[in-house]
Amino acid sequence: MSALYDCWLRYDTNADSLNKEILAENLASVSVENGDKITASAVEEIERFCKALGLPAPQKVESGATLRLVAGLAAVEHKDGYVIEKSSHGFMVAGESSTGLLYGVFNLLQGLSLGKTPEECCKMDYPRNEIRMINQWDNGDGDIERGYAGRSIFFKDYKFMEDLSRIKDYARILASVGINAISINNVNVHFHETKFITPEYLPMVKRYNDVFNSYGITMYMCVNFAAPIQLGGIDVSDPLDERVRAWWKEAAKTIYEAVPNFGGFLVKADSEGRPGPFTYGRNHADGSNMLAEAVGPYGGLVIWRCFVYNCNQDWRDRKTDRARAAYDHFMPLDGKFADNVILQIKNGPMDFQIREAVSPLLGAMPNTNQILEFEVTQEYTGQQRHLCYLIPLWKEVLDFDTYAKGEGSYVKKMCDGSLHSPKHAGLAAVSNIGDDECWTGSPLAQANLYGYGRLCWNADLTAEEIAKEWVGLTLSTNKAVLDVMLPMMMTSRRTYENYTSPLGVGWMVTPSVHYGPSVDGYEYDRWGTYHFADWKGIGVDRTVATGTGYTSQYAEPNASTYENLDTCPDDLLLFFHHVDYTYKLKSGKTLIQHIYDTHFEGVETVKGYIRDWATLENMIQPDIFALVKERLGIQLENAREWRDIVNTYFYRHTGIPDANGRKIYP
Amino acid sequence: MSALYDCWLRYDTNADSLNKEILAENLASVSVENGDKITASAVEEIERFCKALGLPAPQKVESGATLRLVAGLAAVEHKDGYVIEKSSHGFMVAGESSTGLLYGVFNLLQGLSLGKTPEECCKMDYPRNEIRMINQWDNGDGDIERGYAGRSIFFKDYKFMEDLSRIKDYARILASVGINAISINNVNVHFHETKFITPEYLPMVKRYNDVFNSYGITMYMCVNFAAPIQLGGIDVSDPLDERVRAWWKEAAKTIYEAVPNFGGFLVKADSEGRPGPFTYGRNHADGSNMLAEAVGPYGGLVIWRCFVYNCNQDWRDRKTDRARAAYDHFMPLDGKFADNVILQIKNGPMDFQIREAVSPLLGAMPNTNQILEFEVTQEYTGQQRHLCYLIPLWKEVLDFDTYAKGEGSYVKKMCDGSLHSPKHAGLAAVSNIGDDECWTGSPLAQANLYGYGRLCWNADLTAEEIAKEWVGLTLSTNKAVLDVMLPMMMTSRRTYENYTSPLGVGWMVTPSVHYGPSVDGYEYDRWGTYHFADWKGIGVDRTVATGTGYTSQYAEPNASTYENLDTCPDDLLLFFHHVDYTYKLKSGKTLIQHIYDTHFEGVETVKGYIRDWATLENMIQPDIFALVKERLGIQLENAREWRDIVNTYFYRHTGIPDANGRKIYP
């Protein structure tokens, strides 16, 4: 289609530097063993690669192919793993399954397009995490909740799209980085979308499902906990009511008859106004187990979100702490969930801020299936107008040692199942795509989707490695390009943090839209999101000693590290403590001076990004260059607004001038 | 219909205490001299009165009637004046015109329903102001901009209503207090509404027009300055472009052919994103005169709003002052406007705040037609959930001495034309009605519409007199009711001010909706609406000496009074000056203590309203009682929120505790 549209599957990004003769030779013919729909997708992708590079289409042969594709090779031990080999018998990609084969083919094609020789592409690899999921927050009307990349590619006017070509391309994009599960509709299931699981819509559900299946992706849907009321005409949706249980069983039967390999349900219940078991005095285990009972006979899963908190809080109340909510609600239920229920837990206890503590619930439930939830869509992180490469943030979470089972109890070990050996484990993340030509608003935001997939595959990959892969595939393998892009991407999260809310305190955004500075925007609101800034200090006291007691939710030594002002890391200082503006950080600066310095610095860094980006003008594809240039311009304008408003806000509270005499508006 | 619906035209409010025999006797028969559609409306109203009170319908006779209605009686000197007389020849209501007669009949019926004897109703009266206008801000889709009383009674789904019965009742309501002009669509004329002046809609425009005409009301419409582009296919709407001038002339011709006595246009141009002459380097005289030229031949008027300011201001810029804008834009154009152009000027220089200075443009243009604009709809004054009787606020404006022509140059003399003898003068106001059963959200908000009409009639009426009339007509003439209502109504504006933004500084509301506290809501926004609160002080320095120089727009001695901190009234202190929280007010209190005291006091007063209202339970109509009770409950809840957020905001800035030790949340 276009460089913007093709993302990291352009294949011709570095066409000039590839040895096309060798490529043509190795891809002259292809054979398939144990073929199915998924292997057909793999062959199609090879053809796409050849076309992009102007190579002849590979001949499909029965034997003697220059490239053998083998699905179901028992020698590949790991689920959906693959091996790429070159021997005297020729070139071979083999998968433990056809999905594994597909992953191998994507990896081979990407390697070749990066300029590797076929020999250099040889490897054995496999996905380390079982569930590697993407959540769409697409509404039936085509609007995407927290979407910053256009309209839905799934729905329009409460109908499913008839033309599935873009959905197929999305499936390719996801499979190319190993994603194997998707939920297609918003977790906030409104009136119309509640009907998506009824016979009226199931033929289209099946068509979508088949597209994803042919790329090794299992499809899920979000359901409305109150569906028995709306659709079933029952007066309750009490999970212990026999009529309700019968209704869900019948609903599941209907779905699975129409869509036999349907994945199951993703559920947001008792959260931000959504219905749930609390209405009937039941708990989350009651609610999720009921659904699990309905889909269980068909191998279905129920993924239940832990984003549950009191969203009608009174700002006057300094004891209630939203950060405590998920742990307080779910910890007591450990071991009470069915085998096919999985709890989905956001990376932080608040809501995807640019910096917050790691959720203490992660890894804390040894007898419960848990998956980690990230947000690829940049809700609080610049809405895809700002460059914010999120992989470093996610790496911090994955590498966080929970001490749940002593030292080395990293979150990533919860995700790969090695911490507690649950029945199911993995990761999920909210998608950042829409019908924009480049899918993600800014081409640079593609890197977050790419990187999320790569971390799902292997959380030990470094943020730099992932950035380097993505830049090579999407922009160029030219060293000059990488020399610009790597520092830009790797510093971008810190930069965004610098000019927005400081030291883990979060929020300070315009309510509802979550974009642009409004320091007191949520300060007196009902959402439990406060910073408590006054003339003397700022921050949320979450200590056991004098605050909300949230620190006690962590295993030791984390609990003490955070509880104690001396050991609490600067980066999370205001998340855990309320301190004076004159408090000296570990960096040696006062808090107020840190705020001023980071805000000035953040803007200067963005100016540097703009200068650096300009140097790439003739080195990368022009459409990508132009679109990113425009986005960086917006980022700079926004960053200035953040800097000035935040600095003025604190100056107006304290009267303390900048030690370096820079301009703070009075 | 119902007590809620009938407003102050219930007639049976005090039915038990009326002498029905005397009423029946005096209204036994009615005759009309010089009858027309308007006198027919008068007769109909008498019939309605009789029906409401269970009296026999008056007989229509040619002569010898117990009640003679005479239109066009030359002996009544003043335009649309009337006389009510009782002599040996019988009872007579005579008008200078049929409209005057209608006003006389309404006055008579209201007097009788208040329990006056026919003799006590005898009087001579006339409207002091020429233009007595209501502006509807109704959109074609049925939404009302800044409407707090339901949907539009004029439009639905971009169509005019086919059933005109409610519009007729609205015309009755307006005529009963002497309103003689109405504009029916929003001053923000959007895409669809631009077409309302085209032949497609003119038959319905005519029907609406005829309804209003039969109550002596002239109908106007708001037009889109860019209509020649949208409707005419011309590439500009430059007022000096001959094609544009020709287009408007043709448009006016079409309108007046369909609706011969159409009033003219009301225009919001170059304001808050609306198109206007600035685009073409023209000024407001160029723009309005062009339209005036088009409607002039038909006797039409062009009413041009002066609400023009830079709405893309930078909060960092402390010199630009929105308050200056109207004066700066329009003063230089004095004498340049056509005879049939009228400038409509808001009462204050900002935007209908609970307290702001009087606009210095009022009365300042001796060679220009000017009318004063009030806002009956309670945009910034509690949105008809809060009781806020606005007549005292409006009286302050009308009684304000501008000194434009020396002492005694009251704004009300600008309105009645006696200050500068312009061709046209008067008042306009934004309506507060919608399709709610009670028209105005809360029955108590009816009093503002009533009072606006009464002030248009005679600005020398006191707020107490008007309140007393309204209470008697709508609730009861029972002294116990009045003893509750008068203090409630008369203190309500001060009460609302007490718990909201202090001492004229304004704003502090949630952006866009303009309801509920958000102290910094507009502080860093583009609207030019700032309070500049910091750790030391608050307020806008509008002095010549050190501020924006706004005070110089007033004639002396007002300019000096406001310029000088010692003479500036406390109530407007923060509108004109930035002062320290420890500054001593003329009341003897510090500023910060004043803020705390008023906010505590405001809430206590509302509690008192609730107690007092409860005492009326069996003295007034139950539907009215119940609805107001509910609204007062909301008001108390909101007032508490205001109190706590504002007090906490200032406590957090200053660290100064309440001198009386009351609870301020930290």
Image (spheres, coloured by chain):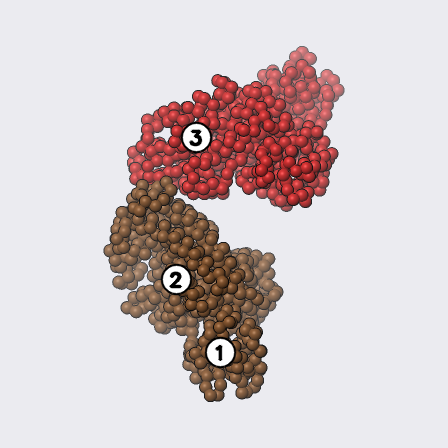
Chain colours: A brown, B red
Residue type pointed to by label 1:
Leu
Chain under label 1? A
> Who is closer to the viewer here, A218 or A251?
A218
Residue A61: give x, y in percent of width and height.
Answer: 57, 84
Residue highlighted by disc 3:
B549
Q: CA distance from mark 1 to mark 2?
A: 34 Å
Chain under label 2? A
Q: CA distance from mark 2 to mark 3?
A: 50 Å
Label for residue A487? 2
- Residue drawn at the location 70% of the way across and 29% of the way down: B297
Whether discs 3 and 1 lie on one chain: the answer is: no
Q: How many numbered circles does the render carry?
A: 3
| Whether residue A93 is situated above or below residue B232 in the rendered picture | below
> Who is closer to the viewer here, A26 or B638?
A26
| Whether residue B272 is situated above or below residue B462 in the rendered picture | below
Chain under label 3? B
Label for residue A101? 1
Residue B522: give x, y in percent of width and height.
Answer: 44, 41
Whether discs 1 and 2 lie on one chain: the answer is: yes
Q: Give residue B11's quadrant in the image.
A: top right
Which badge, 1 or 2, comes first in the chain's sequence? 1
Residue B599: give x, y in percent of width and height.
Answer: 38, 35
Q: Dot 2, crowdedness within 10 Å: few (<14), some or many (≥20)? A: few
Q: Nearer the viewer, mark 3 or mark 1?
A: 3
Q: Nearer the viewer, mark 1 or mark 2?
A: 2
| Whether residue B5 is situated above or below residue B190 in the rendered picture | above
- Quadrant placement of the N terminus of chain A: bottom right
> Who is closer to the viewer here, A437 or B602?
A437
- Residue drawn at the location 49% of the way across and 70% of the way down: A14
Residue type pointed to by label 3:
Gly
- Quadrant placement of the C terminus of chain A: top left
